[in-house]
Image (cartoon, rainbow, N blue to C red):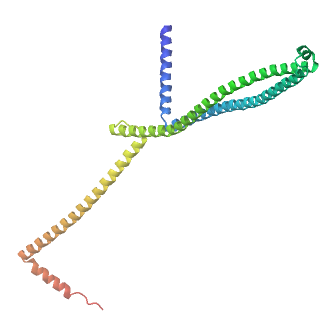
Amino acid sequence: MFRAIGRFFRAIGYMFTGKVNSAADSMSNNPTVISATFDKIIEEKKKRLNEYKDAISAMIAQEESKKDKLSALTTEVEKLEKLKSGAAARAKQIADKYNGDAAAVRNDPEYLKCQSAYKDFTSTLVEKQQRAQELENDLKQLMSNVNGHKSQIQSLMRDLDKLKEEKHDAVADILSATEEKQIADMVNGISNDRTNEELHRLRELRQKASANARISRELAGMDNKKAESEFLEYAQKSAADDEFDALIGLSAKKESTESIAKESKIPEA
């Protein structure tokens, strides 16, 4: 029993879901809905594209920052190389004073100062050069990434333009398909479209008006023929009466009566 109840509710759920899906499909085929859906998709893509551009802008800002750091490091490296060369040149001058006495040279305080500075310049120079090399590698990778993303953005922008064109094509296709379906349904006699009903009603009214006009014309022709028939019949009857009166001698009496009536007519004052 419980299984039967479960199947019953599942069937209701399936039926409801089917109706909802059918209604959704019907709404989705509406040109206005399709246009609005395309507009929403286009806006979403524009939003993501702008976010993508912002991310690339941040990468470009990093690229510029790294370039500035590399430029500063290059200046520092060039300066350290000059300082290193200067310390070595000064140490040589001091050594020359002692005519090859290495022990005396090594005990000279200024020589020791130059030697210490040279070592510091050398270690700092190595560190700066390593950092500059890292920045150069980072810049190469960053520039490659930025160029790749720029190409991707250009491709996405072209896709967005195509999507705008596709929107108009989709709406036109739906309208064309809907019109074709209505015409086919009308031909097949299965259309329930109100427009077709109104067209059918107008066509019936036109046919009725044409029929009424034709009937009126026909009736007018019949009245004329009837009148002509009556006149002909009256003329024939009158001629037959005169002939009959003449046959039995009434026409002479009739003429005498008419003469007396004329003579006895009171003259006008």
Using the rendered view, name the quadrant where residue 113 is placed: top right
Please provide percent x and percent y for residue 180: 39, 39
Q: From what the image shows, is residue 27 above or below residue 256?
A: above
Question: Which of the two residues, 173 or 246, is positioned nearer the viewer here?
Answer: 173
Query: Is residue 51 visible to us here?
Result: yes
Please provide percent x and percent y for residue 148: 60, 29
Question: Which of the two residues, 72 or 183, is positioned nearer the viewer here?
Answer: 72
Query: Is residue 38 visible to us here?
Result: no
Please provide percent x and percent y for residue 255: 13, 82
Please provide percent x and percent y for residue 257: 15, 82
Residue at the location (8% across, 74% down)? 243
Residue at the location (86% across, 23% down)? 92
Residue 125 as seen in the image, left or right of residue 140: right
Q: From what the image shows, is residue 129 above or below residue 174?
A: above
Residue 99 as seen in the image, left or right of residue 149: right
Question: Which of the two residues, 168 or 179, is positioned nearer the viewer here?
Answer: 168
Using the rendered view, name the quadrant where residue 187 is placed: top left
Question: Which of the two residues, 4 or 51, is positioned nearer the viewer here?
Answer: 51
User: What is the quadrant of the C terminus in the image?
Assistant: bottom left
